Image (spheres, rainbow, N blue to C red):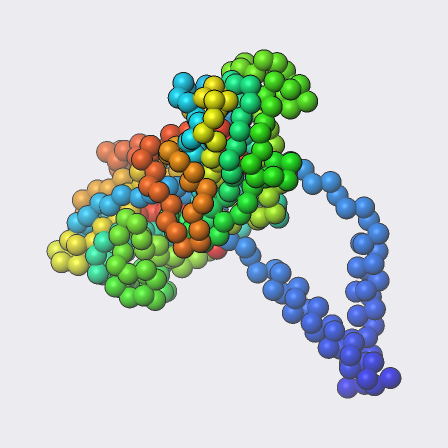
Amino acid sequence: MKNLYKLATMMLMATVLALSAFAQEPAPAIALANLTEGQGSVASSGSQSWDGLSEFVLIPGASLMGASSTTTALYIGFTGGSEADIGNMVLYETPRNGSTVLKVTKVTLGAISNPSINLTSTSVCPIQPVSVTNPCIIRLDTVKLALSPLDDYYFTVYFTLDTNNEKISGLGQTASPGALSGWFLYGDQTRIGVKGALPTNENSDQPPYFLAYVTNQ
Amino acid sequence: MKTIFKFATLTLMMFALSAYSFSASKAENLERGVTGPVGNNTSWSGYSTVSLIPGAGLIPITSTTTVFYIGFTAGAEADITNMVLYTTARGSSTITAVTPVTLGGISNPMIDLASVTVCPVIEISTFNPCIVRLDPTKLVLSALSDYYLAVFFTASDANNNSIGLTAPQFQQSSLRGTYISGDETRLTVGAAIPSTLSFSNQPYSLMYVMNN
């Protein structure tokens, strides 16, 4: 028994030494990876006015490609307009192929969930003016959420009822939507609580209007 | 000293236990599965569903097992006569391997769709589809092969006349599928997947292909 204890102590010391050696290695840089397949081309999201509309985008758990990540980065794109005024942004989590909300995660840009995005600023959109040829793609703040293939996620953004939003257009409705699909509804759809039901997607599997990519960073 | 040794042994055991729990494999998709809401397709007595899992659609996840999930939207009991997975070379219809697929260790299960242990949300519907996880198949899917999951629903069976299978509404899955009258699960190595079958649509019932 005494020998067993000695052996265990020796092994523990060896483990601690090995862990300490590994800990001194610099952490490897995390490579950018798609969590699901994003939109493959850019189009114009049509001529409708976005003031007072919410866009839902389904990020299906069944489409996740296995990149291990504890964070999720959402990228939205614009092809027209001078300022986008967002009322609120959230990420709903539901069971896979279900519609009951399990969790609501706040999504922000510059740490706020109701940003005004100046699309005419070169610090926001380097190539002016924004267009289908020169879309402005904005990375929202990284969400501290590991997407699970056992759940579905709905990114929902509400565009404030104002004149700026009458003129904006997204980069979506492309011929290559990847695994994403989206639709829009009138009103602020970002206030649904846990156990609430998401509205039915009446536009079937249309490509999203604004959400372009879902990556790990 | 004896106390230190005891403490060291206990700590080592804890390390070993935590390492074991981390090694349990996380559920990952092997293919892009069915997304979005599902529809309903009923009356399956005497029919086989055949679902294509294309090698070209495999997500490069390291896995030694393959798990199929099948979905139901109506009915009280599904009576399955047989389930198999056919392997072909990529793009070919000639079968190179036949692997049995089971649920609860048998390839001819009766699935009680009215039981909350099988389908947590009763009554099942298109809003609350019942997704059943089949037993893990000890097969490593290869990008160089295609795979066809064939499930035969027992003929002349009143239960199967009432069951509904999930029928995807979105077209964004990598999976494809069709159905055929009769038992299509008895094909052998060297035989061909019938050329009359068209795989232009999303699969009936097969929802996900995962590693766990």
User: Where residue B137 sits in the image (x, y, percent)?
Assistant: 43, 55
Q: Report the residue at 27% width, 56% height from top.
A: B124
Residue A186 relative to residue B18: left or right: left
Q: Quadrant of residue A175?
A: top left
Residue A6 visible at all: yes
**Image location (x, y in percent) of residue B38:** 31, 44
What quarter of the picture does the N terminus of chain B occupy?
bottom right
Residue drawn where x is 61% and y is 47% of the image: A144
Q: Residue at x 34, y 51 (%)?
A: B70
Nearest the camera: A12 or A125? A125
Q: Quadrant of residue B82?
A: bottom left
Q: Residue furthest front?
A: A162
Q: Is residue B125 left or right of residue B30?
A: left
Residue B138 location in percent, x, y?
46, 55
Question: Which residue is more in the foreground, A51 or A35?
Answer: A51
Relative to B176, is B114 on the left or the right? left
Q: Count the numbered circles shown.
A: 0
Which sits in the foreground, A66 or A95? A95
Q: Residue furthest right?
A: B1
With respect to residue B16, does A48 lie above or below? above
Q: Is residue A25 above or below residue B16?
A: above
